[in-house]
Image: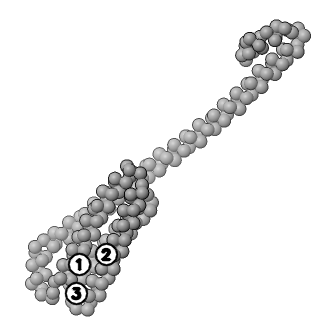
């Protein structure tokens, strides 16, 4: 998996958790404090959108097998971001009327926040599993490179041994050619049976 994507992913998960906490605290604030907190949340949402765009670009630039897995994770992050945006809309659209806030919370907002936290937890677990798989792939790649280096070394040794054997063969043939005892017999063997003396 891409280290760049993982970096963006970590930043997004931290930012998302921080924004969720800010949304919770903004829901109980009033007046100027609430406006300031909402302004901080909106700035954070823009940062989160930028991170999602970066993750999307990075995921689309990777190999298809990794790309599909990362795009699936990215869909979950986009859903999480939409939940945060909806929460901000709810916070900004409600007035100071406590009854309206209670009604919204009773109608399922608490469940939505709980589901969002559960979703974040699942996302972090998935991220951990992907990181573990990534480490296993890196280890396999390292083993493959070591094996390849060993194979190259063995081939070089075999080539040197072949050269030595050819040199020995040529030396024996030369010796036999000039040996007065074997004379023409040596020429015959070297010409017709070049590997006889190996």
Q: Residue furthest right?
A: 180
Choose top left, top right, bottom left or bottom right for residue 53.
bottom left
Which of pointers 1 and 3 indicates the residue nearer the eye? 1
- How would you rate the neighbour count of disc 2 (Cα within 10 Å): few for under 14, some for 14-19, many for 20 or more? many
Q: Earlier in the sequence, mark 1 or mark 3?
A: 3
Considering only vertical position in the picture, is 83 above or below 161? below
What mark, if any, has residue 29 been given in the picture?
3
What mark, if any, has residue 88 been given in the picture?
1
- How would you rate the neighbour count of disc 3 (Cα within 10 Å): few for under 14, some for 14-19, many for 20 or more? some
Query: Residue 55, how many percent across, how many down?
Result: 38, 63
Residue 100 falls left or right of residue 197 = left
Q: Are marks 2 and 1 in contact (CB under 8 Å)?
A: yes
Q: Secondary structure at mark 3?
A: loop
Q: Earlier in the sequence, mark 3 or mark 2?
A: 3
Cα separation between marks 3 and 2: 19 Å
Choose top left, top right, bottom left or bottom right for residue 80.
bottom left
Q: Earlier in the sequence, mark 2 or mark 1?
A: 2
Which quadrant is the N terminus positioned in? bottom left
Q: Which residue is rendered at x = 27% and y = 69% of the image?
A: 81
What mark, if any, has residue 45 been given in the picture?
2
């Amino acid at each position: 998996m891409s280290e760049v994507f993982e970096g963006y992913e970590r930043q997004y998960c931290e930012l998302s958790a921080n924004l969720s906490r800010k949304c919770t605290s903004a829901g109980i604030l009033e007046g100027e404090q609430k406006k300031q907190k909402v302004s901080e949340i909106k700035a954070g949402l823009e940062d989160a959108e930028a991170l999602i765009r970066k993750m999307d670009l990075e995921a689309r630039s990777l190999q298809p097998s990794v790309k599909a897995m990362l795009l699936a994770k990215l869909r979950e992050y986009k859903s999480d971001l939409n939940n945060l945006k909806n929460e901000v809309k709810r916070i900004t659209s409600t007035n100071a009327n406590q009854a309206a806030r209670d009604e919204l919370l009773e109608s399922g907002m608490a469940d939505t926040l709980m589901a969002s936290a559960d979703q974040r937890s699942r996302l972090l677990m998935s991220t951990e599993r992907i990181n573990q798989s990534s480490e296993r792939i890196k280890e396999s790649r390292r083993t493959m490179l070591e094996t390849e280096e060993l194979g190259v070394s063995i081939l070089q040794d075999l080539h040197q041994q072949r050269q030595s054997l050819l040199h020995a063969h040529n030396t024996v043939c030369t010796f036999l050619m000039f040996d007065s005892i074997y004379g023409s017999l040596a020429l015959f063997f070297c010409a017709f049976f070049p590997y006889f003396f190996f």
